[in-house]
Image (cartoon, rainbow, N blue to C red):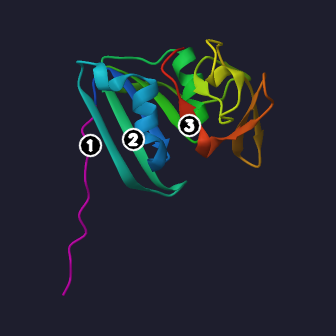
Amino acid sequence: MQVANKKMEVSAIENGTVIDHIPPTALFKVIEILHLDKIEDQLFFATNLRSNRIGKKALIKIVDRYCNDYDISYLALVAPTARISTIKNFEVVDKSQIEPPQEVSGFVRCANPMCITNHEKIKTRFTVSSQQGELSLKCRYCEKTTMQEQIEIINEK
């Protein structure tokens, strides 16, 4: 029994943003960070697509919306392999690898349940570092290190 090789094709967008090479496990965190569940513009996302670079990947296409530098820097916390493409008139006018910020404030919950930020109205603050391709966040208050897979987004930027 032979099965035909089927390929899914995704149509091009005229104007907007394409976020590619997202780790599949980070797709919904990216959607949460960008508040894409609340937009009215056309949105396409797919996950577990084949990628020569990272094995499997997710992809997001957002019609008529562009990511700012602030959004992009925070995407690096959950999707450090992602690439952002800006599309205008069906052409890629800018393509870049995202870079993590050096510091994060008020965006991520501290993984230490005893941290003061989990009990008082104090904005979290972390120093971001990268070791062997893995991001980690060090809390400025309790000095607990939160690894990339432990990152929990809180919806205040």
Q: Residue 78: give its label.
A: 3
Which residue is at a point 69% across and 35% down the rendered structure image? 112
**Residue 63 vertical position relative to residue 132 in the rendered view, above or below:** above
Q: Residue 59: give its label.
A: 2
Circle 3 crowding by C-alpha within 10 Å: few under 14, some 14–19, many from 20: many
Between 103 and 150, which is closer to the camera in this rendering? 150
Among the two numbered marks 2 and 1 on one chain, the one whose residue lies closer to the N terminus: 1
Residue 75 within the magenta-colored segment of the rendering: no
Amino acid type at circle 3 is Val
Q: Which residues are magenta?
A: 1-12
114 left or right of 59 in image: right
Q: Residue furthest bottom?
A: 1
Residue contact between numbered discs 2 and 1, judged by CB atoms under 8 Å: yes
Q: Position of residue 22 (x, y in %)?
A: 48, 42
Marks 2 and 1, how far apart in space?
A: 10 Å
Q: Position of residue 126 (x, y in %)?
A: 72, 24
Residue 4 within the magenta-colored segment of the rendering: yes
Amino acid type at circle 2 is Leu
Which residue is at a point 30% across and 17% down the rendered structure image? 64
Query: Does the rendering let one see residue 97?
Result: no
Which residue is at a point 56% across and 15% down the rendered structure image? 70
Between 26 and 94, which is closer to the camera in this rendering? 26
69 left or right of 125 in image: left
Q: Position of residue 146 (x, y in %)?
A: 69, 38
Q: Residue 10: give its label.
A: 1
Query: Does the rendering let one see residue 107?
Result: yes
Query: Dot 1: what SS?
Result: loop
